[in-house]
Image (cartoon, coloured by chain):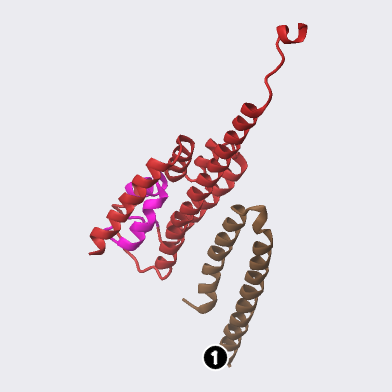
Chain colours: A brown, B red
Amino acid sequence: MSITQSILLFLPLAAVICFFCSLLRRPAMDDVFKAAGKMFLYMSGTILAICAVLHFTMEFLLAN
Amino acid sequence: MAKIILPLVAVLLLVRFVTTSSARQRNAVLLAWLVPGLGHFHLGEKKRGLWVGGLILLTFVAGMAIADFRNISPFDRHSIWGLAHLFGGLMAGIAALATGSLNIYRDNAAYHVGCLYSGVAALLNILAMIDAWDLATAKDRKETLEVAKTDDAPPAPTREGVGS
């Protein structure tokens, strides 16, 4: 299983956990959840982008 | 040692829960354990119950599909995930009964990812149970406050009182 496949499999689970936690939130915790949601989005986006770039670079290098 | 201590702690926590909780809290937690989201339904939180139950069920079934429907088999294949599946209630029980006898005939690279999905879904049900318990506590508290308010209110004037 490649890194990209692994990430594509794990990201939905991470999203489910985040969404589930946001479902169970209380008004007093809104700020915490907003901050955590933003951090999750930034981190997962950055990791996915880095892995995609690495994956396609490796494929390109191996093909040529 | 852990085989003795863990069940003992579980039994002690269960006894404490049964002896210190109200009937509403007990029913909500028991229903939430049996069927994810049912505890919320019982408390009148139907929308939240649908979301919570649907999400848990979807994640659980997605995990089973990823693992070729061969990952729910408490204690004989993966004892650690079997422990997590205990919190899945009927959902995990029915899945174990329906798929426990299936044989693994091919090497599935994503098998453990499927185990993780189903395991996490069952563990998320603990959060749902805690949430149901918390909502039941809030309802109990609200009722107690309402009763206290009606007790403190001055008695309504009677016909005799008005006339005199």
For disc 1, the marked residue is A62
Q: Quadrant of residue B44?
A: top right
Query: Relative to residue B27, is residue B72 drawn left or right?
Result: left
**Region rendered in magenta:** B69-97
- Residue B83 image point, x, y percent: 34, 57
* Residue B78 visible somewhere in the drawing: no
Residue at screen point 42% across, 59% down: B119
Name the amino acid, label 1.
Leu
Magenta stretch, main secondary structure class: helix
* Label 1 Cα neighbours within 10 Å, binned few <14 / some 14-19 / many ≥20: few
Is B56 or A9 nearer to us in this picture?
B56
- Residue A36 image point, x, y percent: 63, 67
- Note whether B58 is above or below B108 in the view shown: above
Host chain of mark 1: A
Is B143 or B129 nearer to us in this picture?
B143
Query: Relative to residue B22, is residue B43 drawn left or right?
Result: right
* Residue B8 visible somewhere in the drawing: yes
Is A60 or B139 nearer to us in this picture?
B139
Magenta run includes residue B72: yes
Is B31 or A57 nearer to us in this picture?
B31
Magenta run includes residue B85: yes
